[in-house]
Image (cartoon, rainbow, N blue to C red):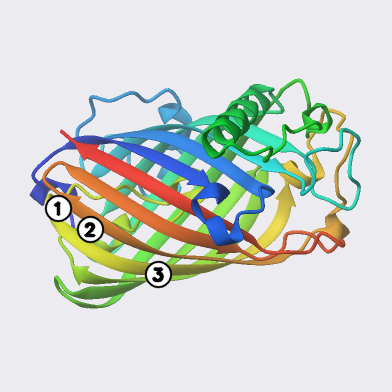
Amino acid sequence: MANEPVYESQQRSRGIGFYFDQDLLVPLANEDRDYTMGLALEFFWQKKDGIYPLDGLAGRAGEWLGLGRGDDNVITSFIVGSVNYTPNDLSISAPILEERPYASLIYLGNKRIRASKHSAVAVEALLGVIGTRVAEEVQLGLHGWWRDVADTSEPVDPQGWHNQISDGGELTTRLRFSNSRLRAELPGKWDLATTWSLSLGYQTNASVGISSRVGKLGSSFWSIPFDPVNRGSFLPSLSSDEWYFWAAYRARLVGYDALLQGQFRHSEHTFEYDQIEKLLHEGAIGVTLASGPAQVTFSVNAKTAELKQSARRQHFWGSLNLIYHF
């Protein structure tokens, strides 16, 4: 791995990202269920002058991957976000046993990344709360706003959030290790990379993936904006001007998911391990445009069914990501 970090060659040393996932962004596939919404803000810095509330944990875990605490090549970010899941029928207040349960997570995390032109290694420490009512209030507000704008009676207000996983709130945590390598490229035109990751905690799983970009490239391969709310492995680009189309795929082997199986606190509705799918396929296609200090990405994402029950179906959602460098 090169000693000189890629970020040293970029024009700006810090930035902020706003990430928004919503099934409403894919009108033809919008069914307002499963993974219904995700939000996150990420603050990233080249120098060690940022906010690092979990950096002690991330630093200790990063040492397993060779990311030294005083390593000047290590880039750090801080992220705050939330993810929300619902069953298919929001009008029913009782648990729908054949459907996935309501679930929500609010989290904060720190990433430590060391990247070169040909590889990137990352560790993320995350601390969150499952089961708050924040998701319910946000969904009620969003549904009410959409009914007013569209002058329609749908979507209905959700009635079953009191049945969510760990209703009332429960602390949770996750450590995630990731590695990505550039496999082929035509500099400035296209590239192809592979990635593996391992997660331990409220989501315990392992994955392998592949991604590719084509267009006018000014950033490194590891900055591809694939699923930053849930499992974004690395950091956004600091490149000033570029545009590209991209596609990404990963296969995930699931060991445990608290947002389906529950955690320590009692939940009204959960699934057993033998009721969930052990192998998931996830993918996305998108377009990224960057000019000056701003970058925007839109993508369409998909994931195969998580359950073996009658509610066996794919998820589709859109993502809108906005980056500003300063």
- Between the residue at mark 1 and the residue at mark 2, the CA separation in whole angstroms equals 7 Å
Residue that numbered label 2 is attached to: 116
- Say which of marks 1 and 3 sits in front: 3
Q: Amino acid at mark 1?
A: Glu
Give the left or right position of residue 111, taking residue 159 as reference. left
Residue that numbered label 3 is attached to: 247
Q: Earlier in the sequence, mark 1 or mark 3?
A: 1
Residue located farthest toward the front when viewing the structure as drawn: 151
Give me the residue at 73% from left, 59% from top. 306
Q: Earlier in the sequence, mark 2 or mark 3?
A: 2
Instruction: Tell me the element at label 2.
Output: loop
Q: Earlier in the sequence, mark 1 or mark 2?
A: 1
Give me the residue at 68% from left, 27% from top. 136
**Residue 129 is at least partly visible in this image:** no
Give me the residue at 50% from left, 33% from top. 81
Q: Amino acid at mark 2?
A: Ser
Quarter holding the C terminus is top left
Cβ atoms under marks 1 and 2 closer than 8 Å = yes
Residue that numbered label 1 is attached to: 4
Q: Residues within 10 Å of mark 1 (few under 14, many from 20)?
A: some
Quarter holding the N terminus is bottom left
Q: Nearer the viewer, residue 59 or 105?
A: 105
- Between the residue at mark 2 and the residue at mark 3, the CA separation in whole angstroms equals 22 Å
Q: Amino acid at mark 3?
A: Ala
Give me the residue at 56% from left, 35% from top. 146
Cβ atoms under marks 2 and 3 closer than 8 Å = no
Q: Nearer the viewer, residue 234 or 132?
A: 132
- Between the residue at mark 1 and the residue at mark 3, the CA separation in whole angstroms equals 28 Å
244 is higher (above) or lower (below) than 205: below
The x and y percentages for residue 170 are 72, 25
- Say which of marks 2 and 3 sits in front: 3
The x and y percentages for residue 171 are 67, 25
